[in-house]
Amino acid sequence: MSKTASLTDKAYRELEERIVTLNLQPGSVISESQLAEQLGIGRTPVREALQRLAREGLIVILPRKGILVSEINPAKQLQVLEVRRELERLMARCSARRRTEAERDVFLDIADGMKRAARNNDGIAFMRHDNAFNALLADAAHNEYALGAINLMNGLSRRFWYLHYKQAADMPLCARLHAAVARAIADGNPDGAAAASDALVDYVESFTRATVMSA
């Protein structure tokens, strides 16, 4: 990996977390030069990271006008979940079949981390383990087309969760459901992984519907 690509990944991870955890608020205007200064990274990697975030729908780049953090549309989350259900079930099955031994160990680490987040009711730890889980699930499926599709939705889903989970969600339950998927994949159980994935999405859908109805 080139130095520029590494810096782009670093900038992307930092900015994505800031947007998802609402440190950069929906609708706020952001500056490429200010972000580069804050991150201590050159403008070229930051610009490339912002272009990736724009493709994922987390920011909107307005030529000659500026860069906006995208607004959150609760109703659209249900459409996102329709797609996520099918993709994540597929990826859970594929990951259980195709994961490497090294990936197995990381799934087990994530399962343990999710259980700790559930015990401690630690929302930030949950978000970080969730991000790691999403990335590993996409990689361990070893399907580049599923990877491309799911990457377009991960950030939007995580930001929606972070905005509403304190009011409407049972975070410890959701963490345990994630741990069940990770454990089934580590065990090499495709049917169990698919069932655990459906149970997770069932819960997230019920949370999302409750949020949309109260909006």
Image (spheres, rainbow, N blue to C red):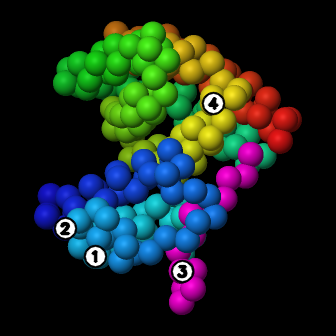
- Residue 44: image tag: 1
* Image quadrant in which you'd find residue 80: top right
Which numbered disc, 3 or 4, marks the residue that appears first in the sequence?
A: 3
Give whichever of discs 2 and 4 has the lower sequence position: 2
Q: Which residues are magenta?
A: 62-74
Q: Residues within 10 Å of mark 3 (few under 14, many from 20)?
A: few
Q: Earlier in the sequence, mark 1 or mark 4?
A: 1
Going by the numbered disc 2, the residue's amino acid type is: Thr
Where is residue 102 shown, x and y percent of the image? 19, 24
Q: Nearer the viewer, residue 210 or 103?
A: 210
Three-letter amino acid code of the residue under disc 3 = Gly
- Left of 209 or right of it: where is 152? left
Q: Nearer the viewer, mark 1 or mark 4?
A: 4
* Element assignment for label 3: strand
Residue 4 got which mark? 2
According to the picture, the residue beneath numbered tag 3 turns out to be 66
* Separation of marks 1 and 4 at Cα, in angstroms: 35 Å
> Can residue 68 be found in the magenta stretch?
yes
Residue at disc 1, secondary structure: helix
User: To which residue does mark 4 refer?
Assistant: 165
Cα distance in 3D space between marks 2 and 4: 36 Å
The amino acid on which the numbered mark 1 sits, given as a three-letter code, is Thr
- Kindly identify the residue that appears in the image at 45 percent across and 27 percent down: 126
Disc 3/disc 4 C-alpha distance (Å): 30 Å
Image depth: mark 2 or mark 4 in front = 4
